[in-house]
């Protein structure tokens, strides 16, 4: 049996004849339901969905596609995957330029709302699979089998993390850190418009977030610094601390309206660098070469479904 090939289908809603509004009408996205998979009851090929394919001579029915949203309208990244259900066939040029265009019919296996935060983001794709041009390209270009395997594994893990029941990781006081937030943030999570929450590390929360012994932060560095930095050690741009291994959930509380998200990913970034004042009570001074900075942890959260 022939091993299916995988093709990348790029979609820029601004230039494409297939606009964002039509996409949202073709798929049954509703409030709180922005991810459609095999477990859901929905039309996998709305209006005989098809797409143009550049390397049509390499494509056959049963081959797989990865649908990638590109352009300036964020978020961008992988929106869905599936398989082709027809052989390539000629058709009118969707752009009106009179070119000879080949199309293939498609059957979706999983798709996310392209306006929601459930899109597998471009920056995540670049980090995980830098060999692929994720921001632009010809629709219907085949990728090497080893790249296809990486994409498939990354997408499956992404969907599993979204849909994994919260009860698989019991919520306990030891595993959960809570924050007071605006009601708008909670609503954005509930409607799939947001899936991340950022926390700036300072003296008030560092011992709750980071591994420590009696309030002394543990460092994950090759060499210990000569001076005291508290929770602000820049360490040449390498995060020098350890996030608590017991931390599994983030609780967000908006005046009693609470949601709990399971941590499924995190990104750590360094803020502006600074140096401490010469004396204990002197204000810190912004310095592009300073040995200190304020670190921010952005947690990717999956809510209970």
Image (tube, rainbow, N blue to C red):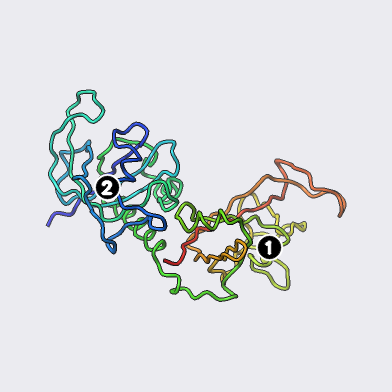
Of callouts 1 and 2, the N-terminal one: 2
Relative to 131, 241 lies left or right: right
Residue 198 horizontal/vertical position (percent): 58, 55
User: Residue at point 35% right, 40% down?
Assistant: 20
Image coords of residue 114 (percent x, y): 38, 47
- In the rendered image, the vertical position of residue 17 relative to residue 75, given as above or below: above
37 vs 138, nearest the viewer: 37
Q: Residue 60 shows which numbered tag? A: none
Placement of the N terminus among the 4 image quadrants: bottom left
- Indicate the secondary structure of the residue bearing disc 1: helix
Q: Which residue is more in the foreground, 293 or 161?
A: 161
Residue positioned 34% across, 54% down in the render: 150
Where is residue 74, by image quadrant?
A: top left
Q: Quadrant of the C terminus?
A: bottom left
The residue beneath circle 2 is 144
Name the side, left or right, on which 88 lies relative to 74.
left
Give the number of the mark in front: 1 or 2: 1
Which residue is located at x 79 percent, y 50 percent? 276
Residue that label 1 marks: 206
Q: Is residue 190 left or right of residue 44?
A: right
């Amino acid at each position: 049996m022939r091993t299916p090939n995988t093709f990348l289908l790029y979609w820029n809603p601004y230039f494409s004849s297939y606009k964002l509004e039509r996409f949202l009408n073709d798929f049954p996205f509703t409030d709180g339901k922005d991810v459609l998979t095999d477990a859901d009851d929905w039309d996998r090929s709305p209006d005989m969905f098809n797409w143009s394919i550049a390397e049509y001579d390499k494509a056959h029915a049963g081959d797989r596609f990865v649908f990638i949203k590109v352009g300036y309208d964020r978020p961008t990244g992988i929106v869905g995957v599936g398989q082709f259900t027809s052989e390539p066939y000629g058709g009118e040029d969707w752009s009106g330029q009179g070119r000879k265009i080949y199309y293939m019919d498609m059957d979706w296996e999983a798709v996310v709302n392209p306006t929601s935060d459930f899109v597998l983001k471009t920056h995540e794709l670049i980090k995980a699979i830098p060999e692929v041009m994720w921001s632009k390209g010809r629709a219907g270009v085949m990728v090497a089998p080893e790249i296809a395997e990486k994409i498939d594994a990354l997408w499956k893990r992404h969907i599993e993390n979204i849909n994994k029941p919260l009860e698989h990781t019991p919520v306990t006081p030891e595993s959960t850190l809570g924050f007071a937030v605006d009601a708008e943030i909670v609503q954005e999570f509930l409607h799939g418009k947001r899936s991340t929450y950022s926390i700036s590390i300072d003296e008030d929360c560092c011992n709750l977030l980071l591994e420590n012994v009696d309030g002394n932060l543990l460092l994950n560095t090759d060499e210990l610094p000569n001076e005291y930095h508290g929770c602000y050690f820049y360490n040449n741009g390498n995060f020098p601390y350890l996030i608590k291994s017991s931390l599994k959930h983030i609780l967000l509380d908006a005046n009693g309206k609470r949601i709990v998200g399971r941590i499924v990913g995190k990104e750590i970034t360094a803020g502006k660098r600074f140096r401490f004042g010469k004396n204990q009570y002197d204000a810190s001074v912004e310095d592009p070469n300073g040995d200190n900075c304020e670190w921010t942890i952005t947690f990717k959260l999956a809510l209970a479904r």
